[in-house]
Image (tube, helix red, strand yellow):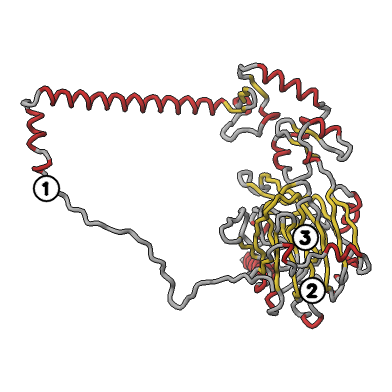
């Protein structure tokens, strides 16, 4: 009995400690909002806490997630190795004495660059992020983006799945730190988009607890060509002096992919994991006032749209062609889930473009549906208990299951039956009308004539005018956001 009470006390104590730890971690999580008339791309709204594992990976605690989402990032000691690969970007840094530094700075007061928008929410918030649509397709690690998320902490989030740990991966960070634009009136977060470049500028922002150290002014520019530039105007502290106790301090690029796998706790549940596959970190000593960094994108496997270019291009390496997806990839990109589902790695082993072309010609020349291997064409269809019972019918480029053909047959039978019923009803009405016309003295026609409209009481309908009235709650005012134009 005493042993049971002791164990119960320990469990309660551990639960309370976990609640305190979660509450402490949530102080630095970002709230994500959408621009007006834009919908969120989805994601989890549950809080996520970070723990550091023994292998050096930053991993989201599964106890807090409940098996929903896990984030794995690269170990810190692999940063330089990843950077030296030069697989996705090359970059150069420029100091105060370089002319290129001034050329890369985008003057937000110059009307020739386009209309500048001072974001009212971000300029008056702390630990907030807002989604903004781009006017052009921006290539990032070979993927084309049309929407990004601007954060008050000096970085841009590029992921499709929004969560509250935006600082972990999938970012463009000129200077990620614990900035608070709401501290002073002159602190703003502004951006412009002229169709060729998208620029975000954090102007005169300060660090909580270090306001007296001075203001930070810097910007990130995303060009339509895929080039990324970081420009720094006022940097009163070094990155080491900023401190990362309350907020991660980073400068560079990062991308990741998400895969869905069965949860170890429950086979029926699915667990999503975000894996960081590449990161570039800038040398912190290069970030000073009146400095700049320019990233130039390199060709990736994703840009090849044919098997021949994919396997023979000398601009890329380790590329494989997945004929089912008609995609070139090395398997390490945001399409990783499809690459695994369609077993593209197995399909591309020891395969040549001639093998694919001969296979396509043989299937395309015949109109007779052929039986194909399910595992090589598509993931297993849901509802098929036995793999031997799941078949794929392929005619030309169309792929469908045998269950879909049966459902199409039932749908066609229903349409035919409905048309036949309508024709029978129409024919019956015509016959009744002819009978009444030629036999007006019969009992049934006389019954209908005696009860014509004169015998029925008139129905009175009160005319109504539907309308909508907007009701404001007492003591509350409408929230009005005013975006200031350029001064």
Give the residue number, with chain letter if any, for mark 2. 216
Q: Position of residue 264 (x, y in %)?
A: 68, 47
SS at circle 2: strand
Residue topped by disc 1: 457
Task: Give the residue drawn at x 9%, y 43%.
Answer: 454
User: Height in image: 33 above or below 350?
Assistant: below
Task: From the top left corner, tell me how far across and down residue 72 is, in percent.
Answer: 76, 54
Identify the residue at the far right of this view. Answer: 97
Please tell me how crowded label 1 is: few (under 14), some (14-19), or many (20+) other residues with Cα within 10 Å: few
Q: Residue furthest bottom?
A: 212
> How much space separates mark 1 and mark 3, taking CA atoms?
76 Å
- Eye-nearest disc, 1 or 3: 3
Does any portion of residue 2 appear in the rendered image?
no
Please tell me how crowded label 2 is: few (under 14), some (14-19), or many (20+) other residues with Cα within 10 Å.
Answer: many
Q: Residue at x 62, y 70 (%)?
A: 483
Task: Give SS at disc 1.
Answer: loop
Observer-nearest residue: 482 or 332? 482
- Determine which quarter of the picture holds residue 327: top right
Query: Which marked residue is nearer to the observer: mark 3 or mark 2?
Result: 3
Residue holding disc 3: 221
Q: In the image, is residue 466 above or below residue 25?
A: above
Q: Nearer the viewer, residue 372 or 225?
A: 225
Rendered location of residue 44, percent (x, y)? 62, 56
In the displayed structure, does residue 440 sit left or right of residue 478? left
- Whether the residues at callouts 1 and 2 have beta carbons within 8 Å, the answer is no
Viewport quadrant of the C terminus? bottom right
| Label 1, label 2: how far apart the Cα atoms are | 82 Å
């Amino acid at each position: 009995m005493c042993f049971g009470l002791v164990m119960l006390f320990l469990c309660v104590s551990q639960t309370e400690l976990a609640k305190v730890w979660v509450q402490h971690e949530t102080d630095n999580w970002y709230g994500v909002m959408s621009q007006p008339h834009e919908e969120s791309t989805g994601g989890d709204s549950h809080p996520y806490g970070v723990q550091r594992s023994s292998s050096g990976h930053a991993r989201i605690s599964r106890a807090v997630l409940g098996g929903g989402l896990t984030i794995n990032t690269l170990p810190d000691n692999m940063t330089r190795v990843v950077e030296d690969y030069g697989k996705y970007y090359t970059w150069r840094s420029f100091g105060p004495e370089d002319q290129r530094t001034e050329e890369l700075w985008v003057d937000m007061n110059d009307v020739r660059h386009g209309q500048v928008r001072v974001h009212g929410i971000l300029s008056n918030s702390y630990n907030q992020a807002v989604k903004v649509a781009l006017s052009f397709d921006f290539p990032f690690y070979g993927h084309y983006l049309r929407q990004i998320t601007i954060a008050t902490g000096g970085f841009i989030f590029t992921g499709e799945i929004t969560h509250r740990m935006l600082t972990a991966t999938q970012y463009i960070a000129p200077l990620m730190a614990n900035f608070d634009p709401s501290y002073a009136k002159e602190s703003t977060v502004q951006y412009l988009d002229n169709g060729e470049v998208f620029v975000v500028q954090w102007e005169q922002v300060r660090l909580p607890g270090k306001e007296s150290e001075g203001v930070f002014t810097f910007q990130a520019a995303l060009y339509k060509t895929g080039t990324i530039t970081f420009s720094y105007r006022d940097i009163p502290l070094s990155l080491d002096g900023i401190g990362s106790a309350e907020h991660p301090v980073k400068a560079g690029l990062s991308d990741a992919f998400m895969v869905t796998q069965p949860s170890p706790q429950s086979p029926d549940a699915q667990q999503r994991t975000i894996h960081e596959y590449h990161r570039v970190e800038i040398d912190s000593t290069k970030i000073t006032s009146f400095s700049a960094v320019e990233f130039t994108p390199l060709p990736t496997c994703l840009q090849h749209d044919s098997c021949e270019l994919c396997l023979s291009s000398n601009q890329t390496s380790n590329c494989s062609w997945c004929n089912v997806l008609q995609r070139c990839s090395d398997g390490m990109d945001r399409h990783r889930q499809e690459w695994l589902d369609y077993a593209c790695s197995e399909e591309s082993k020891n395969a040549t473009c001639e093998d694919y072309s001969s296979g396509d010609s043989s299937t395309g020349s015949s109109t007779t549906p052929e039986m194909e291997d399910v595992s090589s064409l598509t993931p297993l269809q849901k509802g098929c208990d036995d793999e031997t019972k799941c078949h794929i019918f392929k005619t030309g480029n169309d792929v469908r299951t045998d269950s879909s053909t049966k459902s199409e047959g039932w749908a066609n039978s229903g349409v035919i039956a409905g048309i036949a019923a309508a024709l029978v009803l129409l024919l019956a009405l015509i016959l009744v009308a002819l009978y009444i016309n030629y036999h007006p003295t019969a009992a049934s026609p006389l019954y209908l004539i005696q009860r014509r409209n004169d015998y029925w009481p008139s129905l009175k309908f009160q005319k109504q005018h539907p309308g909508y009235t907007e009701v404001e709650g007492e003591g509350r005012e409408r929230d009005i956001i005013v975006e200031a134009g350029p001064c």
